[in-house]
């Protein structure tokens, strides 16, 4: 179901989505009130698995409609569309806290608008991924059997590097929420996300109350028990310094078409910490993080990745798994348990 007050946007989004033979539009509505009424009146065979919901609309806005849509049975996955602004980012994160599955930032005309290839790829991946997630779970394809984890004597872990993209905000929140106690090392995270949105995501994660989280600042000391999120459009790097690590922000060219990117962050951690690095790759399109995980593994560090069944898009973690680098393939909450076990100097059981 498409819900947007602009008939032009509804038509353009319908063309974008229906170009994929695996997607069918069952309804187009102009505001939240129409969305709730239409969803309730559709026959079971036409109930949408996914609702694309604009947040700013007359009559009933998306935030008001969201909880009403989520009460429907079967419950659809709701992907909210927000303006590419600080206010839009705050609204998108509020929607995630209220139960939305994901968000899509509306592209501006300067970037190609709705015809921008990156936007089209993101929309299709999220719609198909969340539709699959809402269906009955299927067995994940066997790729690389998870091996029992072990820490090399005397090496330990000095830092954690985490990367994610499509579906990442919810996976990252699930990972953080599953942390039962403070981490004894700093956690650096890269989420592919526009500038402005990362500050709101950091606030969203900080509100979970498991560990302090903020956008990284250039030159600040990286302290244990804190999560440092790469700001939008800046690479986040770690640098060795007296007594520990400091953050460095870089305007170097994008890697894997992304800035921030996971690979430079992981490479910098290896340069600063050697093999005392723990890399975690969550859901996302593409293969950003693969080269960085190769460097982590070559230095003697440990790589963990999200399993296919729980990933919205098994691109980034799948690339790591298929390369034989992942020591465990698990959902985000179970990955958090493994991270806590490994940073405590012991290995947890692998499911």
Image (tube, helix red, strand yellow):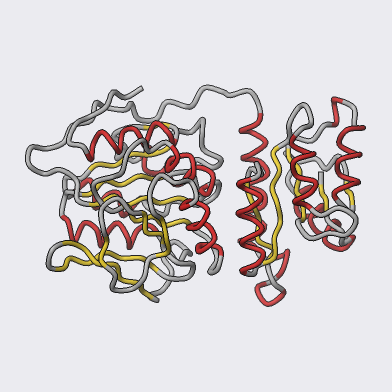
The image quadrant where one finds the N terminus is: top right
Q: Quadrant of residue 118?
A: bottom right
In percent of width and height, residue 300 lies at 16, 45
Q: Is residue 125 above or below residue 351?
A: below
Q: Residue at x 56, y 63 (%)?
A: 197
Q: How many marks?
A: 0
The image quadrant where one finds the C terminus is: top left
In percent of width and height, residue 229 lies at 41, 59
In percent of width and height, residue 18 lies at 79, 47
Q: Residue furthest left?
A: 154
Whether residue 267 is visible to the viewer of this picture, yes or no, is yes
Q: Residue at x 44, y 61 (%)?
A: 256
28 relative position to 155: left or right:
right
Q: Residue at x 35, y 58 (%)?
A: 263
262 relative position to 67: left or right:
left
In percent of width and height, residue 313 lies at 54, 42
Query: Which one is nearer the viewer's eye here, 62 or 20?
Result: 62
148 relative position to 145: left or right:
left
Q: Is residue 60 above or below residue 231?
A: above
Q: Quadrant of residue 85?
A: bottom right
Q: Is residue 202 above or below residue 157?
A: below
């Amino acid at each position: 179901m498409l819900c947007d007050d602009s008939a032009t946007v509804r038509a353009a989004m319908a063309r974008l989505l229906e170009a994929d033979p695996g997607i069918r539009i069952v309804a187009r509505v102009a505001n939240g009130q129409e969305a709730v009424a239409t969803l309730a009146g559709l026959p079971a065979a036409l109930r949408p698995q996914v609702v694309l919901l604009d947040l700013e609309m007359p009559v009933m806005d998306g935030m008001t409609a969201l909880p009403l849509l989520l009460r429907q049975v079967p419950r659809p996955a709701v992907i909210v569309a927000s303006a590419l602004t600080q206010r839009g980012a705050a609204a998108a994160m509020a929607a995630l806290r209220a139960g939305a599955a994901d968000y899509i930032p509306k592209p501006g005309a300067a970037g190609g608008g709705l015809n921008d290839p990156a936007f089209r790829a993101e929309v299709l991946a999220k719609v198909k991924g969340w539709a699959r997630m809402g269906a009955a779970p299927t067995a994940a394809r066997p790729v690389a059997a998870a091996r029992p984890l072990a820490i090399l004597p005397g090496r330990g872990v000095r830092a954690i590097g985490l990367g994610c993209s499509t579906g990442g905000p919810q996976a990252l929140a699930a990972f953080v929420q599953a942390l039962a106690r403070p981490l004894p090392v700093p956690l650096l995270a890269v989420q592919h996300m526009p500038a402005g949105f990362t500050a709101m995501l950091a606030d969203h994660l900080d509100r979970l109350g498991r560990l302090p989280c903020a956008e990284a600042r250039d030159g600040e000391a990286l302290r244990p028990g804190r999560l440092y999120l790469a700001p939008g459009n800046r690479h986040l790097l770690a640098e060795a310094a007296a007594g520990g690590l400091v953050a460095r922000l870089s305007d170097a060219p994008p890697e894997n078409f992304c800035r921030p990117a996971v690979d430079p962050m992981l490479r910098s951690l290896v340069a600063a910490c050697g093999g005392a690095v723990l890399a975690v790759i969550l859901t996302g399109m593409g293969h950003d993080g693969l080269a960085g995980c190769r460097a982590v593994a070559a230095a003697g560090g440990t790589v963990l990745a999200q399993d296919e069944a729980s990933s919205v898009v098994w691109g980034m973690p799948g690339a790591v798994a298929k390369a034989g680098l992942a020591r465990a393939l698990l959902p985000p909450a179970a990955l958090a348990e493994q991270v806590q076990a490994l940073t405590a100097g012991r290995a947890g059981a692998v499911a």
